[in-house]
Image (cartoon, coloured by chain):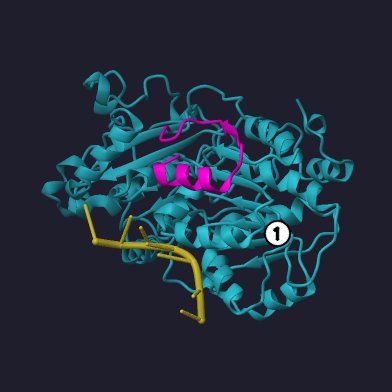
Amino acid sequence: MNFADLGLSDELLQAVELAGYSEPTPIQAQAIPSVLMMRDLIGIAQTGTGKTAGFVLPMLDILAHGRRRALMPRSLILEPTRELAAQVAENFEKYGKNHDLKMALLIGGVQMGDQVKALTEGVDVLIATPGRLMDLFERGKILLTGCNLLVIDEADRMLDMGFIPDIETICAKLPANRQTLLFSATMPPPIKKLADKFLSNPKLIEVARPATTNVNIVQHKVNVSARKKRDVLRHLLQTDNVTTAIVFANRKTTVRDLAKSLKRDGFSAGEIHGDMDQPSRNAELQRFKDGDINILVASDVAARGLDVKGVSHVFNFDTPWHPDDYVHRIGRTGRGGATGRAFTLVAEEDAEAIANVEKLTGGPIPLFEIDGARAASSPTAEDQPAERGRGSRRAPRRGAKAAPEAPAHSAEAEPLPRAERPERAERPERAERPQRAPRRQREDTPVAASAPRSAPERAAPVAAQREAPSAPGEWNGPVPGFLHISALTA
DNA sequence: AAAAAAC
């Protein structure tokens, strides 16, 4: 199966090929022909399955016919967060380079001037967050009567964020005779109701069961006292072959403090949360995407849908209160068929949350034991990682040097109960693993044909990156990575 | 308990 079999135009196929993709993902293969046939669609899909290109590509060909009119956008895509909206806009630009289509991105936090100007001149595609769209609508800057293609993306997130009344209001302003596509990772009753009300005879596509996690993500939890979380995080960042990581925390204040602390310790870290102004949010995200920083500390603004290539690790500094968010957070890694690793730091205060997560994901998350982390109730100065104070704080050691092998914790010694045993016996020793130059795999929505582009040299700590498969679904088996169990007490 | 989204 390739893109040419799906009924897309030649100019679109050319743009797709130019972007480096040859083979559609399952959701693209199923969605694109139906969308081209103007059918309504419900797509139940995890992020990272290529769902964005699943609607962007056919939309471009549909919109290629017909012409735009002032104030009357021809299509509308609703996104829950500004970052997601911007990301979809990037997709339109990338794949629409051979089309003469105009797009407007309507999000808050930025000046209205350019948005109003674009609307006045006429656009084919409107990509919007609900707040700014409603605002501009009430100011009389938009007429939705000519908008006969609607995409509601991340519907379950819209629900969580209380956007459903806005969505209903917006839907009511669109012509009844339109095509509607709805995407959601889960189908809670209110979303089902919304679909029943606003879609007609939709084709249902489901590529991943809701509330299950990607098999390409190896998950662990680490028991730790609240005051040792930073030490354990630093330790894992230095010892688990981390190339690019997102660290999630539950509170914006935690995000801020943690990012500051990591930077002070010489990590190449940035932050993103909703208290930052939009230009700063954009800048931090761009630095992360460009590889100028390799650790992004984030609130749940970045939990869903955010598509950054080659994220090797997700760390939950706190366990999310809402178990669904766990699935979304760890879904930032293991994307497009690559393998990823997710660690959740569990303190007493996280106990209830992690129980809920495990109930949702259907079983206990394997415990990853770090000596010293559990004994943290009596922390002393010796509990610090050995290299602290010895080396430069500005340039932490690479993982390979972070901590010595602890013989007492070799795979053979003190076997743990089966359920709690980290999978490490089959992992090769670190010394045997080649140090590879850091790089970032391009794995955007469609499938990367080959040839990952190189990213700029990353700041420390950067260790070898795991090999990612060249095509989606082509999983290379268990993560060929390496779990370095060593003592925090050196 | 938090976060997100309009001004």
Relative placement, left or right, of A18 versus A204 is right
Relative placement, left or right, of A68 versus A262 is right
Which residue appears at 75% of the width and 76% of the height?
A: A120
Count of numbered circles in the view: 1
Q: Which chain is yellow?
A: B
Q: Which residue occupies the extreme right position in the image?
A: A10
Quadrant in the picture for residue A128:
bottom right
**Percent of width and height locating residue A205:** 59, 32
The correct choice, above or below, for A76 with respect to A476 in the image is below
The residue type indicated by label 1 comes to Cys
- What colour is chain A? cyan
- Stretch of the chain drawn in magenta: A187-212
Circle 1 crowding by C-alpha within 10 Å: few under 14, some 14–19, many from 20: many
Q: Which residue occupies the extreme left position in the image?
A: A378
Which residue appears at 44% of the width and 37% of the height?
A: A341
Relative placement, left or right, of A263 versus A206 is left
Relative placement, left or right, of A96 versus A346 is right
Say whether residue A268 is visible. Answer: yes
**Percent of width and height locating residue A147:** 70, 59
Name the element at disc 1.
loop
Say whether residue A287 is visible. Answer: no
Q: Which residue occupies the extreme front position in the image?
A: A176
Q: Is A451 colored magenta in this rendering?
A: no
Q: Is A195 colored magenta in this rendering?
A: yes
Which residue appears at 11% of the width and 49% of the height?
A: A378
Task: Return the residue nearer the eye: A390 or A283.
Answer: A283
The correct choice, above or below, for A461 with respect to A466 in the image is below
- Which residue lies under the disc numbered 1? A147
**Chain letter, disc 1 residue:** A
**Percent of width and height locating residue A31:** 67, 36
- Can you say which quadrant of the picture contains the N terminus of chain A? top right
Task: Return the residue nearer the eye: A277 or A175.
Answer: A175
